[in-house]
Image: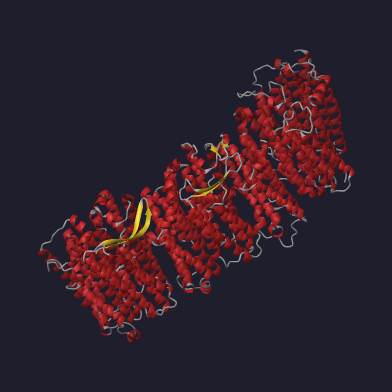
Amino acid sequence: MGSYITFPELLIWLPLLAGIICFFTKGDRAARSMALLFSLIILGVSVASLFYTDTKFVNFNAVNYYYPNNLGNTFFVGLDGTGRLLTFLTALAFPIIFIATYKSNYKNAASFFGLMMLTQSGLMGVFCSMDALLFYFFWELALIPVYFLCSKWGGEKRIQATFKFFVYTFAGSLLMLIGIIYVYQHTPDRTFEDGTIAAHSFAISSFYNAALSGTEQNWLFWLFFVAFAIKMPIFPFHTWQPDTYDQSPTSVTMVLSGIMVKMGLFAVIRWLIPLFPLATVKFSHVVMILSIIGIIYASFIAILQDNLKKLVAYSSIAHIGLMCAALFAMNQLSVQGVMIQMFNHGINIIGLWIVIDLLEKQTGVKQISKLGGVASKAPVLTIMLVIIALANIALPLTNAFIGEFLMFSGLYKFNIWYTAVAGIGIILAAIYTLNMIQKVFYGNTNSITESVKDISWNEKLILGFIVCLIFVIGVYPQPLIDITKESVTILLSKK
Amino acid sequence: MNITTLSFILLSVMAVGSAIMMISSKNPVYSILWLIVVFFSISGHYILLNAQFLAIVNIIVYAGAIMVLFLFVVMLMNLNKEMEPVKNQRMLLIAVVSGGSLLLVLLSALMKMDAQMPVQMKIGDQGLISNLGKVLFTNYVLPFEISSVLFLSAMIGAVVIGKKD
Amino acid sequence: MSNFLQIVWLIPILPLIGFIINGAGRNILSKAVSGFVGSAVIFASFLLSIYVFIEVKNGHSEVVHYFNFINIESLKIAFAFKIDPLSSLFLLIITGVGFLIHVYSTSYMHEEPSKDFAKYFSFLNLFVFSMLLLVMGANYVIMFIGWEGVGLCSYLLIGYWFKNNDYTNAGKKAFIMNRIGDLGFLLAVFWLISKLGTVSFDEIFSQVSLDKLSLADKTGITLLLFVGATGKSAQIPLYTWLPDAMAGPTPVSALIHAATMVTAGIYMIARSNILYIMAPLTQHVVAITGLATAVLAATIALKQNDIKKVLAYSTVSQLGYMFLALGVGAYTGAVFHVMTHAFFKALLFLGAGSVIHAMGGEQDMRNMGGLKKYMSITHLTFLLGCLAIAGMPPFSGFFSKDEILAAAYANNPILWAVGVFTAVMTAFYMFRLYGMTFLGKFRGTQEQEHHLHESPAAITIPLIILAILAVIGGWIGIPEIFMHGGHRLEAFLEPVFRQSNAIATKHALSHSKEYMLMGISVAAAFIALVFAWNKFSKYQKSETVSTGFTKLLENKWYVEEFYNAIITKPINSLSAFFNNIIEKKVIDGLVNGTGKAVNYGSRQLRWLQSGQVGAYILLMVIGILILFIIQLFL
Amino acid sequence: MDIKAYIILALTLFTIGIIGVLVRRNAIIIFMCVELMLNAVNLLLVAFSKMHAMSEAVKASPTYVSDAQIFVFFIMVVAAAEVSVGLAIIVMLYRNTHSVDVNFLNRLKN
Amino acid sequence: MNAIILSAIWGIVMMFSAVFIKNKSVPKYLALAGIALLFIANGIELNSGRSFFNIDVHGMLHTNSFNLTFIAVALGCTAMFFLLNGRDIEKTGAHVGEYFALLFFILCGVSLCATFNTLLILFIGIEIMSIPLYILTGSDKRNLKSNEAALKYFLMGAFSTGIMLMGIAFIYGGSPNATFYIDSIQLGTGKLPVMILVGLVFLMVSMSFKVSAAPFHFWTPDVYDGAPTVFTSFMSTIVKVAGFFAFVRLFENAFGAIHTQWQTLIVFILISTLLIGNITAVFQQSVKRMLAYSSIAQAGFMLFALFALNVRAKEGLVLYAAAYSIATIGIFSILIKMEDFTIDGFNGLSKKHPILALSATIFLLSLTGIPLTAGFQSKFYMLMAAVENGHHFWVVIVAVIFAAISAYYYFKIIQAMYFKEPAEDFIQTSEISNGFRILLILNAALIIVLGVYPELILGWLYH
């Protein structure tokens, strides 16, 4: 064990290394290139991991270092299907972000890219951890660089907005920490390779075998769930999100909305449901109702939202709400849908942010009411946006359709009325998306949009790539399904 | 009522009375003098309990050395007048009420003890100088030595704080 | 397994290729090239469709399976096409009419800049692609892909002149209303998945599956599917988008909003006929909704002055007719009417387009009149179209409409009566339209008059072809009473509706009765026709403000206003309420309130730290007191 | 005498000391009140030592009984050291402010 | 044992150095040598279990790997303190040698508090820690704040001594063995004699006072604020954690068996400490005063050791002592260099002194309890202990909510350093040497190392 470097390790350490190197790189261009180079290498590793890892959860490719501590926690990382999908998303997102914002100039670029890579490392860690404490570590670690990124390079009200975000998530994760400790106290003995026995263990296998009564599960469920709900975010824990998305630098917003919100869903899949199966069943209605309220509520707010970034933020809340609801429906269709939708949503929303970033950079405004007529100035940009936005509202033959279709059909199996109400979200999504397209891109140009130029090569490249991905997955989603199939079955067997 | 009880009551009344006088005297010098009276009556108690060594040390160290030091300081500062212009009646009330209730709470709890626990009066040799001395320099040699550190620091304190730069 | 059917994937792929070529090359391609590419791919598809149609006619129906779209344990969705009489017929209509309209468009859109011209053709191709997917899909999901796809193309084409806010609004409205319907469609699909675990037509319509579904299931599923159909095919209550959709270029209106897309709902119900026939309640709902829509739209059409609006309402009305047919179980009749309607409505729209073209964009009939002498081909073909839609024998409309009315009578005479009433109105408003446009004197400006001309060949040739079809198209469905075996369409479609026909209770009408019904309806329509002809050939502009019932009709029963009040406004105010009150005050207020409470507490608590030793010790004593009380007395 | 009498006495003196600390504003007097509290403790300790002297179990090891009195001795030692430092501080303050009134000590607050 | 005697001896050496050596910087090096000696001597004792001095202490001291490790932590932190702040101690006043002597005497008291086995040694140890602190607090003689702080500290300290002695008296009176030895007070597990209970409460009050737990914390903000900043740093870290160690040692050995009977009191103290410490800190404008309140808040977390009183709690306490002390010493050493002690004084520090800002950030993150820092590990151990304890689970939840609030004020400084612009022409800090920077980085690195590998300290506990 641990005698050779494995994929999860590479995925965690490479970004960390890259981050440190970026910090010490002199010159903005060099740091930028360095970050891009490393992110591409990591993408390569991730792609390789898709091919070379065993899909079976039981034999997941795990590194299990014994790290001499009487607590019985280890540096225990591994990749199962879900993990591989999300690490791949993470690995894919960063080069996309770097290329799309290649022309942005950041003050102090070395620190910026360093922190970005550290964020990636933290995210990879979250998705690879097979040890509860390690998971908590990375969970927080992913947050810290993001805090600095947002506060340093963000918009006008960045400090307050980011701090709200930070305290909110920090409070949530501390509750989870208590939960982790409590579960830990109820785990069985663990024998390490060298024969030492720890009374309890943080390893995922021990956690899954923790002896928890129904009542214990009930309140532990909420301790964990609140942390995850804040991260996702689920109504009514979502208010940090629009402000943060609004104020963060766009590349960080992409990380936040594309990947970090998936941490919450991932955590529910990896930890919450298998740990507290009884409570999951018991509270699934509560969670789903909250999620569905969130869908409708956020969609409604998005309709009159004038701030482009907040609009996307609310749309993201609605989408995540759907994923969360589907997850708790706990059947093969819905969970499978969530799995691939996590990936798809990540891709789509990053695409949206790229377009919004371009618009904001060129016009300096993000108020929908101040824009207009962009289509006649920047047709390619418009086409890209329209495709991505329509993918975002799950038009058939785009990637999100597959996910939403599966999620809805799973949800329907669970409860008809939830599906019907959540389905209203589909209509509302069409309303706000089309409103946005109409007001920003259609109509006549005004003094602000007069000078908008169409996109340049790097944006074309990246948006084109995203659009291709949207269609490829939309037409042939099977590979994506195959990656996670096994995980779904295992998750459902925990029920 | 035997003589022991009588002297106990007498000394107690004296101690409590002088203590009250001490905290209520406006002139600091009077306060010091009343405190010395308290110390004397406590020494009386020690004698009643046959703790001769402590009785003497109390007189010498407390009444003799410490209180004289206080007196010096008060004189030095020329505080032998009524220094406190306004007496805060409300503070007095709050203090007496809270102090009194503390006493009440403690006593009501402690007086519930059923067992009679008599105190050995006038006899017993534990309090004799020879016995204490033996114990102090054998069993208690460590604290004894260590308290020198205390005095050293007190000394340094006097130097650091008292010496003019 | 016949290998030639393996190539049917080419039919949708060709338009897709056209879309990609035109879309990607819109900056390079000249108008001629993009117009040619756009039309050629459709023509190729059309040829393939004919080939497929012949194959099918020879009995080679089959499901062509390509790959697994979604493949999970509990749900397998194949990417497969179902080639059978129904779909092959629709293929012909779509590619055939589509091709004509493409050709028409090359001329009609010629004044657009070449970039937009290419964009137009790419969208049109994309539409054909989606429509083909819709009809070819072998399961509800593939159908739904096309279903949403056509909605999208409709949105894009309505908002083709995207600088005009009204146009983009109309597009948006179309898309959203369609989406409401789509939700119903999706829910039905989910229902099927949850009950049967499959979406494939063949599996669902098999006896095994049908037995698994209870009556409630069938009713629910069919009702939800019908909701989808009301959205796509503009039925009550979701019809209001279609008249607004006339904002798009006229060929688009002809293709999408008359001939093809709007009939998707009928196609879908016809496809699911077995489910519907087994859900009588739904059948009633479909019939009544269809009929109500037919009447409502017809009444509105009576007082419209915009030439395209009249046609749009007429389309809604005719679609209502088709739903009536579906509702009474006359599936063949519905499909028949889809076909004839595609011919004559496309013709009418294209004719209207030709008129508008000549009028320099003018659409108000009050400013037209007397165009007969300027545009003879357009006039003639238009007249044929009007006669066809009015149900005059032996034009195509007569046969299909008659079949529907007969079936309606068999079901319930009241349905028939209302149907005839609608037919009368149809004849009236169509000839009002005809009269106001082509007869009388020209009422437009001098400049317009000067500009009037017959349209070029690219426009007139499709008109002529469509006019021929509008005349003879009905002859494939000649009723039994005229000619034994004359209803070749019924025979052709028989395999599709075989199951339903077995279940449906046939009320055979006696021949005399049938003749009588036919006579009544034709006569009534003819009277209305003549009346309208007389009245509107002498039409003069008048400034009188209409009142009462007329005003109600002119304002389309105030349905728009009603929807505005009960849907649009509440949505907006709810949005504002959520955003301003709940989000900012309540939830964020709670979150920020926590922060504020901490700050406030901080400001208050620090007064404890008064700086006074006495106070500190007092607080300590109180602390001691509390500890003692806890320890000793609690 | 019963130990209760001594407990009452010692606690009374102790409480008087506390009240003195609370009501007086002269730093020296406050300090003296603390000394009074210490003396109350001393008295109580001695009384306890004599109480334990009556207990058969404890009598067996006589040094144990002296513990309390040694402790009192150490209390006095510490008190003496404390006094020297305390008075030095008070004098220092007096030098700077010409006052020993603790109520004027409010530069540090909140 | 080694530490107690050597620190007393070295205190005297320092005292004489003040008399004989006039060069002001020599005492610093002498003190460093002394602390190194102490550390090594203590290390030898910890490693081999044998002391250099063979004195019969009659069981009054009890050394084991636990308290020796704690002493090692305290000595290590003191060494760090000397290294970082040596020059600032020189600047405080004329009596450099004396200051160091007093600091060594305090270390003697710390060692006594860590190893005491009778109430007498505890009492003397606490006094040895306190009396030099009164002096050090007042060492800035001209500064009225320093004077005031010293007097307040002294008066309240003396008062708490009285309380403590009363407690000891009652324990003695209530103990059937008539003993001051904490491990032989002999309590059953049943209902306690009321005298013991009274004594226990008095002791708890006075120990709470020493560790500045609410509602006996009132001296803390004023004294920490008024004292010269170097000494605030020392007293808020090493002295305070020693007080905690003594607190836990006393209550574990003397009253551990009846833990549940007094746990409610600890809950009360713990909650009020967390409440007052965290909430009041939020509004503070002066970083120094804010850190004073933060130290109260941290005390609230350390009280979990008493709340839980199990093995994990004791491990956690040692870890907490190290993590808290290292971070606080670090942040104070930076604070001392600042010209303006308000939060605004930190504005834009990252631009002028990135290393200072970075290490300050690490210290603050550690104090907040972010993973990868020692602060997280220590808080984690405390929470583990508290959860393991099984009673009053809600307290743990309240505690983490307060931990989240603590982020509020710690991050204010981070925000100021990184995201705000400094005022024009503002001299932010006094001169900063490269050596100081290196030491800061080392200090910060130590926090990270402990955060990843707490075994570094915990491993010694069971040596």
E338 left or right of B82? left
Q: Is residue D64 above or below residue C267?
A: above
C530 left or right of A470? left
Which residue extends farthest front?
A: A3
A449 left or right of E159? left
Q: Position of residue C146 (x, y in %)?
A: 34, 64
**Badge count:** 0
Residue closer to the observer: C551 or A169 = A169
Residue closer to the observer: C610 or A182 = A182
Q: Position of residue D5 (x, y in %)?
A: 72, 20
Q: Give the colour scheme of this rendering.
A: secondary structure
Q: Position of residue C548 (x, y in %)?
A: 29, 67
- The quarter of the picture where the C terminus of chain E appears is top right
- The quarter of the picture where the N terminus of chain E appears is top right
Which residue extends farthest bottom?
A: C450
Q: Is residue C602 visible?
A: no
Q: Position of residue E383 (x, y in %)?
A: 59, 40
Task: Give the residue displayed 14% in from the left and 58% down from the top.
Answer: C507
Residue closer to the observer: A187 or D87 = A187
Q: Is residue E425 above or below residue A373?
A: above
Q: Is residue A453 visible?
A: yes
Which residue extends farthest left?
A: C512
| Snapshot quadrant of residue C170 | bottom left
